[in-house]
């Protein structure tokens, strides 16, 4: 059991352990130590979203890194995938993202990318955590000229915008396309409007004035009803809603209907299959993806490979199997031909390219997939005991799985960051699956 790292880096309430300055400093020292190779100068690139606490954690982590004789490159607010990209492009040894993604502003988190732009494997995170907990490098303190320096990179936003514009095929233009973009008052507040405008679209930006406290507040991908209203009011061709660090996206059609990550994967997979660019006729997603996605892909002759929850595990499976399209229902979409991690703007651009190539509105493209009714309940628990050790829960799951048959699914798992159990039930009857999900939730309270 890891004590600091969760399923996606470190996350928690800012200024409360483990998301405090002391931990950030120790983490900076441990990261610098693990990734030092030889006697050359090493560099760690640090970016963040727009949270107030980002200044505190950025300063603490920079201090820890410099104290180990490693230099720091500060890029300021930038989407998570942009930090992964610049880590590669600037040949940094490590990339650090200070962000709690879709969480409210009082939370924060830290994610780490290797020099190739991919998230660290579990083993490396465990190595870093061990160093932090054991104070194993406490006596390693370079002095004089060997101490690290910090540099501000002023053109990071421009570099990332240029890279994103190359995602759109050169023979296509967004001229005449009307787009509402909800930036969630987050890391993409400059980047997203600039990209779509420079490609020719008429852009209506929403929530692009961060103040350190309004990130994700009743806006962005968690509140698609906001952008749906704006799309209808503006008579736009589509709406694009990002989360706080812009690594996930949900899209709204010209009619105001929501398309989540499953829908976008189905649309893009179908087009890539037609273009013969979908590697090995396979899409990678997690166990949370809707049964409707699996059925839609099966009709196209495409296999759905499922992983445990977490975009990092999707990417690992993609790299191991040689696949180039994967993602999560939540809107983390990974196109490995363009990015090393989930990128909401890349996903939106490629969805737009399908619309333009096929000459059809998003509402028509969405018909490729019919979602199966799905209910998800989050139940608080005192402790995360192994589910196999809870006989009442096991009995409820087994009975409901039998009743579902092949027309539905049951998935019960613990959150990677909270003392909560997540219960998902799918089936054709919404009322029935709601009842089943509640029965499993109640079983957690029985001995």
Image (cartoon, rainbow, N blue to C red):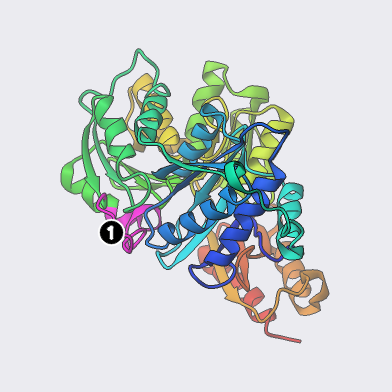
Q: Residue at x 29, y 47 (%)?
A: 256
Tag 1: Cα neighbours inside 10 Å, few (<14), some, or many (≥20)?
A: few
**Image coordinates for residue 23, horizontal then vertical, percent:** 60, 64
Q: Is residue 350 on the magenta stretch?
A: no
**Image coordinates for residue 251, horizontal then vertical, percent:** 37, 43
Q: In the rendered view of the protein, which quadrant contains the N terminus?
A: bottom right
- Compared with 82, 219 (above or below) is below
Q: Give the residue at the far top of this rendering.
A: 171
- Compared with 435, 184 (above or below) is above
Q: Nearer the viewer, residue 310 or 279?
A: 310
- Compared with 418, 307 (above or below) is above
Q: Main secondary structure of the magenta part?
A: loop
Residue 260 visible, this orientation: yes
Splitting the image into 4 quarters, where does residue 358 fall?
top left
Q: Is residue 79 left or right of residue 283?
A: left
Q: Is residue 322 left or right of residue 378?
A: right
Region of the chain picked out in magenta, as a range: 208-226
Residue 426 visible, this orientation: no
**Image coordinates for residue 417, horizontal then vertical, percent:** 61, 65
Q: Nearer the viewer, residue 336 or 406?
A: 336
Splitting the image into 4 quarters, where does residue 398 fall?
bottom right
Q: In the rendered view of the protein, which quadrant contains the C terminus?
A: bottom right
Q: Nearer the viewer, residue 419 or 52?
A: 52
The mark tally for this picture is 1
Q: Nearer the viewer, residue 444 or 151?
A: 151
Q: Residue at x 54, y 63 (%)?
A: 375
Q: Is residue 216 on the magenta stretch?
A: yes
Element class at badge 1 = loop
- Compared with 405, 414 (above or below) is below
Name the residue tied to disc 1: 211
């Amino acid at each position: 059991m890891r004590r600091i790292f969760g399923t996606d880096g470190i996350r928690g309430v800012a200024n409360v352990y483990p998301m405090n300055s002391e931990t950030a400093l120790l983490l900076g020292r441990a990261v610098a130590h693990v990734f030092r190779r030889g006697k050359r100068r090493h560099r760690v690139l640090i970016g963040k979203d727009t949270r107030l606490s980002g200044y505190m954690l950025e300063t603490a982590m920079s201090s820890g890194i410099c104290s180990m004789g490693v230099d720091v490159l500060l890029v300021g607010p930038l989407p998570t995938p942009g930090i992964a990209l610049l880590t590669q492009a600037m040949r940094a040894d490590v990339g650090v993202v200070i962000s709690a993604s879709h969480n409210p502003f009082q939370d924060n988190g830290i994610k780490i990318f290797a020099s190739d732009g991919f998230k660290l494997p579990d083993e490396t995170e465990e190595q870093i955590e061990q160093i932090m907990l054991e104070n194993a490098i406490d006596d390693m303190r370079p002095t004089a000229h060997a101490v690290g320096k910090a540099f501000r990179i002023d053109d990071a936003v421009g570099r990332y915008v240029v890279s994103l514009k190359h995602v759109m095929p050169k023979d296509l233009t967004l001229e005449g396309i009307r787009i509402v973009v909800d930036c969630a008052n987050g890391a993409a507040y400059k980047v997203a409007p600039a990209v779509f405008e420079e490609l020719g679209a008429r852009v209506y930006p929403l929530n692009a004035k961060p103040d350190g406290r309004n990130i994700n507040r009743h806006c962005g991908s968690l509140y698609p009803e906001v952008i749906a209203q704006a799309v209808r009011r503006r008579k736009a061709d589509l709406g694009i809603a990002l989360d706080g660090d812009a690594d996930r996206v949900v899209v709204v059609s010209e009619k105001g209907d929501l398309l989540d990550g499953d829908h976008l994967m189905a649309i893009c997979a179908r087009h890539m299959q037609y273009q013969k660019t979908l590697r090995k006729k396979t899409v990678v997603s997690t166990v949370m993806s809707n049964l409707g996605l699996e059925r839609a892909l099966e009709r196209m002759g495409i296999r759905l490979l499922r992983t445990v929850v977490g975009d990092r595990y999707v990417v690992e499976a993609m790299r191991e199997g040689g696949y180039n399209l994967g993602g999560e229902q939540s809107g983390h979409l990974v196109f490995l031909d363009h990015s090393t991690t989930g990128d909401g703007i890349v996903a939106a651009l490629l969805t737009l390219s399908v619309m333009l190539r096929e000459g059809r509105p998003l509402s028509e493209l969405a018909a490729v997939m019919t979602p199966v009714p799905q209910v998800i309940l989050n139940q608080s628990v005192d402790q995360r005991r192994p589910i196999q050790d809870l006989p009442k829960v096991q009995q409820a799951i087994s009975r409901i799985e039998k009743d579902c048959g092949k027309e539905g699914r049951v998935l019960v798992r613990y959150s990677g960051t909270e003392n909560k159990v997540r219960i998902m039930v799918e089936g054709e009857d919404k009322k029935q699956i709601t009842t089943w999900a509640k029965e499993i939730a109640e079983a957690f309270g029985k001995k």
